[in-house]
Amino acid sequence: MNPLIELRGITKTWPVTSGLFGARKRIHALEDINLDVQVGEILAVLGESGSGKSTLGRILARLETPDQGRYVLRGELQKGRARHQKDRWRFGSQVQMIFQDPFASLNPVHSVGYHVKRSLVLHGQKADKAGEILDSVGLRPGPGFLEKFPFELSGGQRQRVAIARALAVRPALLIADEPTSMLDVSIRMDILNLLKDLRAMHQLAILLITHDLPSAFYLSDRLVVMYAGQVVEAGPVAEIRQQPAHPYTQLLLKVATERIAKTVEKPRDAGMLTAQLRETRSCLFATRCPKVQDLCVKAGPALIRMGTREVRCHFPS
Ligand SMILES: Nc1ncnc2c1ncn2[C@@H]1O[C@H](COP(=O)(O)OP(=O)(O)OP(=O)(O)O)[C@@H](O)[C@H]1O
Ligand SMILES: [Mg+2]
């Protein structure tokens, strides 16, 4: 079966001005990303701050244009940003995105009903389904929420509204960029469970962007681990969980087990910027790798297929 989404050779860089005379350098947010997303699959994209997760999500949502590469959705080539209204609607009926901060993504002067109905109507559906959709995301009874305003809701309820609005158009892919990181720890699990149920109900593919390994393990079928714009390891969750092959994945796993369920972000590592600017020929992870050897410093490894997995390491476990 053809994948829902195929990304081939996606690269995205950003200019930075730094150093004497403002020398132009470029941050590599994404480098040569090849990724397939299957219908109904939950894929988690994992990595610390700056690894390129949101950039990947934004390119998939066509909010950003890659410098290079091909993006194919259901066999159709997608070109850059969806600029025209008609293109946006057509694309939006297949791919939707939700964000970290549900308050920022809802308009405070409009009711819950307005948000969901507008999404329905824009995509040619009947507005009277709004109550039912709210019900399906756990805001029950749905019709009772229609007249409420965002400020009257809790963070978790607001995120449910954002999910309802995204799902109103019956997309094939939902991109969720850190959807629980601003929510109370106590309700994070509820939102993850909701996403899990929605996948089962609607054959919805979900791209979960997170730096929280436990959430990724809990929800996803497949993991993509990123570091400084590169995929360093990708494969089935169960396998990676049991035996992570890349030293970076091993580190993430170790940190996750040691500070159980604590998802605070660590300050960005100094080696990360050098890596992002590609001011090194070494493996980008070499400065932090506990297993670094001479070869790693001489040349960075390619992403190699190992059975069901892909790993970018000269000395994978
Ligand atoms: N619009 C932009 N202009 C300049 N640089 C950008 C822009 N968007 C992203 N970047 C840079 O690209 C790199 C990757 O950013 P991205 O937001 O994709 O990382 P991330 O993995 O989502 O991090 P976080 O966990 O902090 O959300 C970062 O170094 C970031 O500063
Ligand atoms: Mg991000």
Image: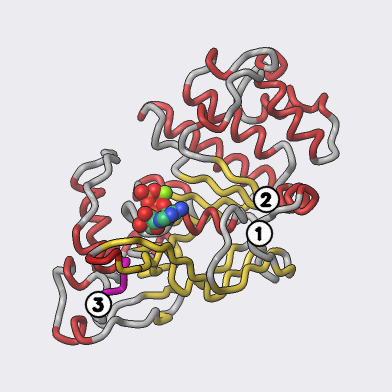
Q: Which of 190 and 14 is in front in this view?
A: 14
| Label 3 CB sits under 8 Å from any ligand 1 atom | no
Residue depicted at 33% across the width and 61% down the height: 17
Q: Which amino acid does label 3 sit on?
A: Thr
Query: From this viewpoint, is residue 317 visible?
Result: no
The residue labelled by disc 2 is 203
Mark 3 or mark 2, which has the lower sequence index? 2
Q: Nearer the viewer, residue 201 or 169?
A: 169
Mark linked to residue 275: none
First-in-chain label (2 vs 1): 1
Q: Which residues, given as a range, are shown in magenta?
A: 276-280
* Magenta-colored segment: predominant secondary structure: loop
3D distance between C-alphas at marks 3 and 2: 43 Å
Image quadrant of ligand 1?
bottom left
Residue 280's disc number: 3
Q: Where is residue 43 in the image (x, y as percent from the top left)?
A: 51, 56
Task: Please tell me in which quadrant of the rendered image residue 293 appears.
Answer: bottom left
Type of amino acid under label 1: Val
Residue under the point 78% across and 34% down: 120
Q: Which of marks 1 and 3 is in front?
A: 3
Between marks 1 and 3, how big is the CA–CA gap?
38 Å
Rendered view: 235 above or below 122? below
Circle on res. 39: 1
